[in-house]
Amino acid sequence: MYDVAIICPNNALATGITGVIDILNVANTLAGKQIFSWQLVGIEERKVFTSQGLVLPCDKILAELDRVDVMLWVGSQFQGPQSLWQSCQAYKPFKAHIVQLSEQSEHVIATCTAVSYLATSGFLDDYKVTSSWWLKSFYQRYFAQLNVSQEKIFLRDGKVLTSGAAQCYFSMMVYFVEQTCGAALADELSSWLAIPQLLTSQQSYMQIGAFEMHRDERLLSLQNYIKKNLSDALTLDTLAQQINLSERTLIRRFQKQVGLSPTQYVRLARLEYAKRLLRTTRMSVNEVAWQVGYQDVGSFKRVFKAQYGKTIIAYRQHFS
C-alpha cells in the first residue's frame, strides 16, 4: 500500500485536493483493495483555507510529517507573480525537512503552482520539471537554475512527477496509477472518470493575456501595438523602432519580462485572434490568414496545427 501525504497550501484550489483524493479512492474501488491511503498535511495549521472559502481539516502539519511513500504537493490559486513569490517564502523555514522527506519518499509529485513551493527547498534543482504554462517568466526570474519544460501536461524525471496548469493533474494522476499499479487499472480508471489520455501539451491552452502580467510599461505599450496591428508585417526591426530599442535589447528585455521572444508573442497573438475569427465569423481560411498577418496560407495552417494539435478545419467544426 502507498501512503500518500497531500501537502495543502492555503488558497489551494479545492478541486486540486478533492480531485486527487477522488482518483486515489476510485483506483482503490476498481482494484477491489486499498492500494492507496492518504493524509492531508497543512503547512502551519491542521486545516487549509481553499481559494473558494472552504475549510478542510488536515491530519498533520508539515513539521509533524514523517517518511511517506508519496509526497504530493497541490497548487494554490494564482494571484500574480509577486504574490506567488511571497507565498514561496513561507516554505523556506522547512527547506531541510522538505528535502529530507523528498529524498526518503519513493515518489515526489507537484502540481501547478506547487512546483514553485517545492522548488523553494532546492530539491528540484537536479530534476527536469514542468509547470503552468503562464509561469514561464516567473521561473526565469526567480528560479533560473531550474530545468523547466512548460509545454508538457506532465513530466516525469526519475521519482519526480510534475504537472502543468490546474486540471493537468488528472492526466498526471492516471499516469501515476499506471506506473504504480499497471496499465489495466489506469485504463479502467480513465474510462470510469472520463479522463482523456491524449493530452500531451499545454500549448493549446496558452493565452496572450497571461504574458502581460509584468510592469514594464514600454513593453506593455508594444504588446498593445502588436495586438492592434496583427495584419502588418511586425518585423523585429519594426517592433524595436516602435519603442526606440535596439533589436538585441528588445529580445533580451522581452524574453526576461514576458517569457517569450517578440516573435513568439506575435505568433501567439495572431493565432489567438485567428481562433476568435474562426469561431465567430464565416470568413474563409484565406481571409482569416490575411487578417492576422499571414500571407502564406499554407504556413498559417502548419503553425496553427503545431500550436493547437488540430487542423483549422477540425477546430472550426468543433464550434459549428
Image (tube, rainbow, N blue to C red):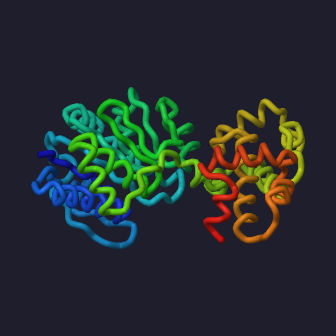
The residue positioned 36% from the left and 73% from the top of the image is 53
Name the residue at the top extreme: 126
Report the front residue among 239 and 289: 289
The residue positioned 53% from the left and 51% from the top of the image is 81
The residue positioned 71% from the left and 33% from the top of the image is 252
Report the front residue among 167 and 251: 167
Report the front residue among 29 and 61: 29
The vertical placement of 55 against 138, above or below, is: below
Across and down, in percent, residue 23 comes to: 27, 58
Across and down, in percent, residue 309 comes to: 59, 49
**In which quadrant of the rendered image does the C terminus lie?**
bottom right
The residue positioned 39% from the left and 71% from the top of the image is 52
Image quarter for residue 55?
bottom left
Q: Is residue 286 left or right of residue 272?
A: right
Q: Is residue 171 left or right of residue 316?
A: left
Q: Is residue 139 left or right of residue 282?
A: left
Across and down, in percent, residue 79 comes to: 50, 59
Across and down, in percent, residue 22 comes to: 26, 62
Q: So how many labels did they put on this image?
A: 0
